[in-house]
Image (tube, coloured by chain):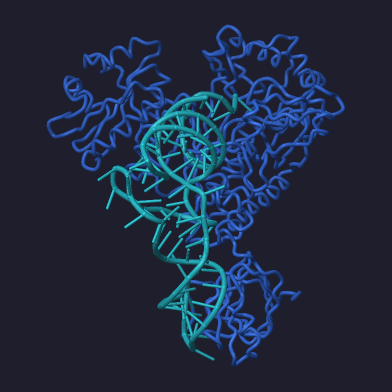
Amino acid sequence: MIKRTHNCGELRVMEEDQDVRLNGWVNTIRDQGKGLVFIDIRDRWGITQVVFELEACDEALVTEARSLRREDCIGIVGKVRRRDASSNPNMGTGHIEVVGGELVIYSRAQNPPILPDEHEAENMSEEVRLRHRSLDLRRPSMQSRLQMRHDLSALTREFFHRFGFMEVETPLLIRSTPEGARDFVVPSRVYPGKWYALPQSPQIFKQILMVSGCDRYMQICKCLRDEDPRADRQAEFTQIDLEMSFTDQDEVIKIMTSFLRRVMKDLKGMELGQIPQIPWQEAMDTWGCDRPDLRFELHLQDISDLAPDTGFKVFTSALEKDEGCVKAIVLPKAAKSFTRKKIDLLDETAKIHGAGGMPWVRWTEDGPEGGAAKFIAPIAEALQEKIGVQPGDIVVFGADSWETCVTALGQVRLRAGKLLSMLKGGWRACWVVDFPMFRWVEDRQRWVSEHHPFTAPRVEDLDRLESDPGDVLSAGYDLVLNGSEIGGGSIRIHDPEVQQRVFNVLGLTEEETQEKFGFLLEALKYGAPPHGGIAFGLDRLVMILTGTDNIRDVIAFPKTQSGADLMVESPGPIDEEQLEELRITVDTPEAETAEA
RNA sequence: GGGGCGGUAGCUCAAUUGGUUAGAGUCCCGGACUGUCGAUCCGGUGGUUGCGGGUUCGAGUCCCGUCCGCCUCGCCA
């Protein structure tokens, strides 16, 4: 093997006339005939042009170089030469080339199914890319995403190390607990019929570490939730997880704010401004979403007081509902560019998210026009006054129970923001605070935690925990960047009595809590410090830092939407003996097992 | 579990209303070329139209089922 002196991205005119050795892959071959051939050699750091010519070597070497094919793995020895007239300003190394004097072919490549070529990758089906991931990852853009991920991990460890955090590993094989997402489970061989669960997060372990006196814990850890993936969600994902003792909400927010600032500055050269704190109620009322995208306005405005005067049945019947309301969004100067088709898109968005429809009007010098104009006409003046609509604008309305109304309009807002190209540029973060403690779930006929069952209720709400659970706020907080939730945490319950009361509200009997969470309640008994923490979604943070909207692009070996790894072809079958050893019998329809 | 889009050469795509031997670019193979840089030019190989069934004289195209990928609703404390 040729031991390299440089990588393929670093040679400059400064190294002129130096003898160098490079290792890498053949990116392209430009064969000019019997006496001249150009080879672009690529490694993780870049691409360098190597030239084999009769003036510098014998014919046999040129012939061998001409036999190279894309993705052959090679090493070369040569001399750096300045390229004057023929320089290529598009490449970092474009002002030099290496005149080849020796060539070692480590490994010839069969004709590869896909080429690590950015031009082609733009159109390549993801299925093919995932199946041949080793080749896909050779692409510079994929390499740079992996690099960004590494840079973030390295910065994270360094940052928290300096603040006195200690990285502690927590187990992967734990026990299944109620609440939360569906668990991935692992059968026990030693205890047939019993199962481990893979952690949805190290939540309880990090709390126990606080009880153990670790004081400040952090971990970059895998979390697993057996739920359907999305474009920004994988069943298996990575969290930056941390927990602090003797802390409060303000301190956690302060440290994490400076962490995010540092990330943006070091990795993107961006100064992130002040990060406002927005109460959950305000976020929902104004943005229709608990993770508001502050890069554009299009606020939801309440017009419930004007709605009765319209005589519009959609409005009046909404107001009759429990917590019914009517809200409006002004789309400034949209009248011209918004065709009926775009309005229909917004209407469809509203419907998908639970609204019956989305009334709208176009505003002209003479007031409302089109859509629901005849209903809006009676309140035109008051409405103009209230929401500041101008001629040339479009106004869209939502009318329903509060939750349906704001969430549907919140989605309409996002869609409209995209259609109006308002999402460009900028980094806007906010903290969302004052979350409700519980949410009533109609299907299950019970309260569930908005955050998780270990989140502390606000002290002032403690005595209403049982009497009015829906009204209790928690000491929880989410960090939102450009409309994406990148972190969430809370101050935890450190009083076993309060913890038991919360479990009770969630409908867990004392027996059940003892069985499922006994170890936590036990630990809290022996002097638990006040503590709290947060978990950051590492994958999502890297997505934002690398500007991709596909989480699979920031994970080296991701899974598809049905949880398969197309490269290793997991999940796969296991041997009969393995099943027997685990005392597991499989009961699947024949059709499914026969298929392959 | 529901909705939407898609699956044709190794890769990216085309194929009129159901009609001849399923085409093109690229990759690959062969040839030409001493300054290319998404090299160019000439020639060539390459197909179970995801899979199974049905309708038809005839199916890439129509129907039914199924598998896979992407987006999305539910779900994701």
x, y (%) of residue A20? 68, 80
Quadrant where the N terminus of chain A lies? bottom right
Q: Which chain is cyan?
A: B
* Horizontal side, residue A564 vs residue A268: left or right: right
Q: For chain A, what colour was chosen?
A: blue
x, y (%) of residue A523? 80, 22
Residue drawn at point x = 18 percent, y = 36 percent: A391
Quadrant where the C terminus of chain A lies? top right
Residue drawn at point x = 58 percent, y = 85 percent: A81
* Horizontal side, residue A341 vs residue A567: left or right: left
Specify the quadrant of the image occupied by residue A504.
top right
Query: Residue lying furthest right in this view?
Result: A190
x, y (%) of residue A15? 63, 82
Residue drawn at point x = 54 percent, y = 20 percent: A436
Query: Residue lying furthest left in this view?
Result: A366
x, y (%) of residue B34? 49, 89
Residue drawn at point x = 63 percent, y = 28 percent: A490
Q: Is residue A231 visible?
A: yes
Specify the quadrant of the image occupied by residue A585.
top right
Q: Is residue A287 visible?
A: no
Instruction: Between residue A427 and residue A344, name the one nearer to us.
Output: A344
Q: Name above or below for residue B1 compared with residue A313.
A: below
Q: Name above or below for residue A299 compared with residue A40.
A: above
Query: Residue lying furthest top in this view?
Result: A467
Report the number of discs: 0
